[in-house]
Amino acid sequence: MDSLFDLTGKVALITGSSRGIGRAIALRMAQHGARVVVSSRKAEACEKVAAEIRTAGGEAIVVPCNIAEKAQLQALVEATLKQWGAIDALVCNAAVNPYFGPNKDIPDDAFDKIMACNIKSNHWLCEMVAPHMAARKQGGAMIIVSSVGGLIGTNLIGAYNISKAADMQLARNLAVEWGEANIRTNCIAPGLIKTDFARALWEDPTISKKATQGYALKRVGDPDEIAGAAVFLASRAGSFMTGQTMVIDGGGMVNFQSV
């Protein structure tokens, strides 16, 4: 019997996949048979991940891309299609957060950058990829890595949380617009995960303890603990799920205490 999680022959395009959650998703999708496009701004960092995949017997290519640049996103899609002729799974993982503190003090340029990179770039990329998925008539999966921050308030990363809430709504809209073409769009909303991106929240013991005190599991998560959800959503196992947000947060939302 074929595995529900088999991605053999599928093409997975993953932004922000040179490290952290994106890297973990790339490695696990390749392990399940996908041909992976590793992408972030720095080619050298991407090559290291692609080399890991190839060493393990998988297939991977590197296409550097700055998600803030629409032309580079289009080039990313075109390079993927040129290499493999399809995109079966898109993972919008890349994001930014250049500001840490209360929203009352955030500079306009930092706010604009967060909204442009975390919302608009995902909108652009999904709308670039979805027509190709629809034209092939084989369906597809678009996955946006959001955050539990999109479900709560905070005085530390407010603009980031606003952008992540918007990503959840973006997924719902895309699910409705592209559902008839059997294109599924969902979000993954991780809690605090031990990545470089979230270092400001977990590296300081005081902040980390406060951030996870309401977590049922009482700890920070690991990037690999998010990757399985992406495999699920991209595979036959997730074939009837769309427009949803999967919360993976160590039980934080069921035992929430404000940070």
Image (tube, rainbow, N blue to C red):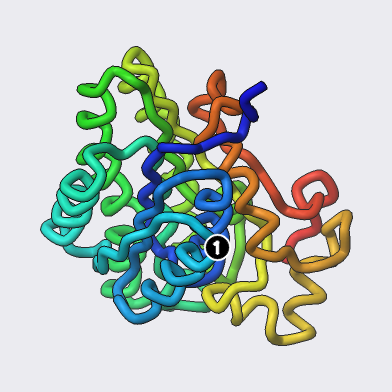
- Indicate whether 198 appears above or below 67: below
Q: In the rendering, at what x and y percent does residue 118 appear?
A: 37, 57
Amino acid type indicated by mark 1: Ala
Q: In the rendering, at what x and y percent does residue 246 appear?
A: 62, 39
Nearer to me, 220 or 231: 231
Quadrant of the rendering where the C terminus is positioned: bottom right
Nearer to me, 41 or 162: 41
- Answer with the quarter of the image where residue 203 lies: bottom right
Residue lying at 25% horizontally and 23% vertically, measured from the top left: 136
- Indicate whether 135 appears above or below 107: above
Element type where label 1 sits in the image = loop
Residue lying at 57% horizontally and 35% vertically, measured from the top left: 6
Residue lying at 57% horizontally and 51% vertically, measured from the top left: 31
Return the residue at label 1: 56
Q: In the rendering, at what x and y percent does residue 79 appear?
A: 18, 53
Residue lying at 34% horizontally and 63% vertically, measured from the top left: 39
- Indicate whether 237 appears above or below 90: above
Q: Is residue 104 visible?
A: no
